[in-house]
């Protein structure tokens, strides 16, 4: 079974430029998460989708970050414009369900390492 | 904001020894999970313990949970070089999973 796929794996951009990350979750997983992980820290949730609906985007900096999950499958996270402080690893994860008793496990992709110069 | 605090931040032991990592948290939880992250790779789920459970085993892993002290521990027995990684506890509250800062474990041959 294929895991969570993310692309690109690495991205280097100059500040003020736009950047986009793509995620394809595990087939059948209706919940999708985007996390940001700073160096030496644990992941921090940016946004969570239940199917097509963003049910928790409280930690998403909405002035420059946007996300979408069309058709409830793939998702894209965008930053426009990027700032130096956005340098981090952006992780995508998926799970079968957050509310089913044994559906708690989140499966993570390899992440996209972003460097903003 | 991160709820879980792992202790120690870094741990270095000899292969074959046991490794123990601790996690403390602040608010009530539904469950607590441990994840492993190898260098430059994504996180892998190791084990989940629910708030009404006190101990759980999975292979060489043993997790305990003390809700009265708001703390958990992860024990890895008979460590191997492949166990070298960062280990994160994550607390599941009402709405989301919140990760700690992790313990960096190094297994020396």
Image (cartoon, coloured by chain):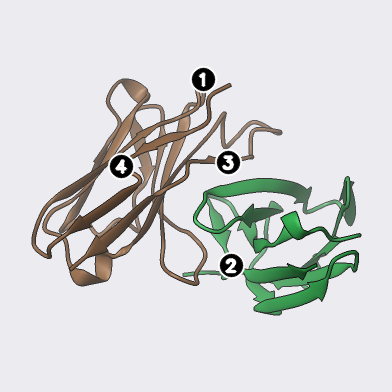
Chain colours: A brown, B green
- Asked if the residues shown at circle 3 and circle 2 are in contact, with their CB atoms under 8 angstroms apart, the answer is no
Cα distance between the residues tagged 3 and 2: 16 Å
Residue extending farthest front:
B109
Quarter containing the C terminus of chain A:
bottom left
Pointer 3 indicates a residue of which chain? A
Q: Position of residue B35 (x, y in %)?
A: 65, 53
Same chain letter for marks 2 and 4: no
Q: Residue at x 27, y 25 (%)?
A: A70
Say if A50 sits above or below B8 in the image: above
- Asked if the residues shown at circle 2 and circle 4 are in contact, with their CB atoms under 8 angstroms apart, the answer is no
Indicate left or right for A38 with A95 as reference. Answer: left
Indicate left or right for B100 with B18 as reference. Answer: left
Marks counted in the figure total 4
Cα distance between the residues tagged 1 and 2: 28 Å
Residue at numbered disc 2: B100
Pointer 2 indicates a residue of which chain? B
Q: Nearer the viewer, residue A89 or B48?
A: A89
Cα distance between the residues tagged 1 and 4: 23 Å
Marker disc for residue A28: 1
Pointer 1 indicates a residue of which chain? A
Marker disc for residue A106: 3
Cα distance between the residues tagged 4 and 3: 21 Å
* Residue A13 visible in the current orientation: yes
Q: Residue at x 57, y 50 (%)?
A: B43
Q: Position of residue A16 (x, y in %)?
A: 8, 62
- Asked if the residues shown at circle 4 and circle 3 are in contact, with their CB atoms under 8 angstroms apart, the answer is no
Mark 1: give few (<14), some (14-19) or many (20+) Cα within 10 Å. Answer: few
């Amino acid at each position: 079974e294929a895991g969570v796929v993310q692309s690109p794996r690495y991205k280097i951009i100059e500040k003020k430029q736009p950047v986009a990350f793509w995620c394809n979750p595990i087939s059948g997983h209706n919940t999708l998460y985007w996390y940001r992980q700073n160096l030496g820290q644990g992941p921090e949730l940016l946004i969570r989708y239940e199917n097509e609906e963003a049910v928790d985007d409280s930690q998403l900096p909405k002035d420059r970050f946007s996300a979408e999950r069309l058709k409830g499958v793939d998702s894209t996270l965008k930053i426009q414009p990027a700032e130096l402080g956005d340098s981090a690893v952006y992780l995508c994860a998926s799970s079968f369900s957050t509310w089913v008793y044994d559906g708690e496990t989140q499966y993570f992709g390899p992440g996209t390492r972003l460097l903003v110069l | 904001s991160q709820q879980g605090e792992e202790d120690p931040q870094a741990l270095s032991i000899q292969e074959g020894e046991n490794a123990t990592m601790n996690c403390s948290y602040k608010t009530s939880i539904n469950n607590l999970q441990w994840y492993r992250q190898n260098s430059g790779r994504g996180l892998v789920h190791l084990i989940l313990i629910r708030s009404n459970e006190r101990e759980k085993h999975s292979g060489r892993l043993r997790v305990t949970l003390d809700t009265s002290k708001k703390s958990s521990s992860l024990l890895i027995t008979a460590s191997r070089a492949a166990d070298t990684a960062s280990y994160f506890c994550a607390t599941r509250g009402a709405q989301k999973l919140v990760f700690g800062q992790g313990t960096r474990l190094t297994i020396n041959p």
